[in-house]
Amino acid sequence: MKFNGYLRPDGKIGIRNYLAIIPTSVCSATVAFNIASHIPQAIALPNQHGCCQLGGDHEQTVNTLIGLGKNPNVAAVLVVGLGCEGVPIRKVAEEIASTGKTVDTLIIQECGGTLKTTTLGIQKASKMARDISLISAQEFPISELCLGVECGGSDFTSGLASNPAVGVASDLLVAAGGTSMLSETTEFIGAEHILAKRAKTPELAKKILDLIQDCEERAKMLNIDIRGGQPTPGNIQGGISSIEEKSLGCIYKAGLSPISGVLAYGEIPKEKGLYIMDTPGQDVESITGMVAGGATIIVFTTGRGTPTGSPLAPVIKITANPETYEKMSDNIDIDASSIILGEKTINQVGQEILEEIVAVANGKLTKAESLGHREFGIYKIAPTF
């Protein structure tokens, strides 16, 4: 199977050709949006952080912004800073530019305020947009795709049908030489031993087990019972009884392929294969981490229904609940309820999901894209000071 994608200077392949306007702090977000509103090809990221962050929390925001700029779906980047934020504006730009992409910067305090920065930004962005419009799509094998798998608003059908079907699609992609990422660390709890058995090395198996142990310890340090938030009230209403049951359904999204590695939030894998990324269970923050890690397309299962999208990667929505599909057909791309109804097998629907992934990689808009859903959030791991 093949798709038409965009070759980047670093050899990565994108399935969209975006101009990203990246504000390095919440203080520069409005100017970034003002600039993007005048350029049809531009997407401004609604970054809410970037200042008064310390240690690992600061580093995570910086690395996530860099990773988003490096994502293969991005052809060029305009970094917009205020000038006094904690995020090093020029470092972000330089790291993204190391991929060979065109990158430019604007600093509001140096340009003279909102109006002057916006005017200059529109001039710069319009030139960048014209340049990237000349990049032609080329044909590539699906081994060049990087898939992120996510579940949100899960119900009893998720673990029984839609997640296993996505697992089949993930296995097919990995078998073809592609890359897939499983996220949502809190939703491995109680099933981590199953994932550990699939690790390629004993050291990696221990790393998977330690990942879950660390997650539980962080919750204990806050004197919080993590089972108060997982499963969520919506999950419980949808028929999921415990965090272990939710986890057993969640990990089905990763199919049966061997696990090649564990990634930190937003970390880019060095090789192809199946990876686990350490993200929260919160859908938007989890997707942002995978996109920062290079995921060019997201498959998102939902039993209860959710409209969530992403600014830089198309999000394919799947439900196996026939009532949810009927109510939210404007948001759901694939109706997998045929599995629950006994009309199709998990393998058949898994093949259909892979075909939809290829169609979207070839330019088909997902429903989230067509409706303008660009939800975004960077995972914070410490308070802001």
Image (cartoon, helix red, strand yellow):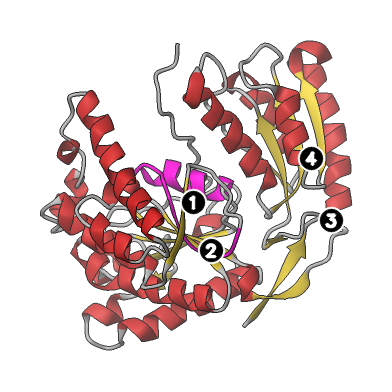
Question: Which amino acid, mark 1?
Answer: Gly
Residue marked by disc 4 = 97
Is residue 307 inside the magenta stretch?
no
Tell me the tag on residue 309: 1
Question: Which amino acid, mark 3?
Answer: Ser
Instruction: Give how far apart the Cα atoms at labels 1 and 2 are.
Output: 9 Å
Q: Is residue 225 above or below residue 358?
A: above
Residue marked by disc 2 = 366
Relative horizontal placement of residue 370, taking residue 258 as reference (left or right)? right
Viewer-side residue, 37 vs 113: 113
Quadrant of image for the C terminus: top left
Instruction: Give how far apart the Cα atoms at labels 4 and 2 are.
Output: 29 Å
* Magenta residues (range): 271-292
Q: Residue at the location (57% across, 22% down)?
A: 50
- Name the N-terminal-most of marks 3 and 4: 4
- Closer mark to the observer between disc 4 and disc 2: 4
Asked if the residue under mark 2 is in contact with the one under mark 3, i.e. CB atoms within 8 Å, the reply is no
Instruction: Give how far apart the Cα atoms at labels 3 and 4 are.
Output: 19 Å
Q: In this figure, what is the number of numbered marks? A: 4
- Closer mark to the observer between disc 3 and disc 4: 4
Under tag 3, what secondary structure?
A: loop
- Name the N-terminal-most of marks 1 and 4: 4
Image coords of residue 278 (percent x, y):
41, 45
The picture quadrant where one finds residue 68 is: top right
Under tag 1, what secondary structure?
A: loop
- Name the N-terminal-most of marks 4 and 2: 4
In this view, the residue farthest toward the left is 241
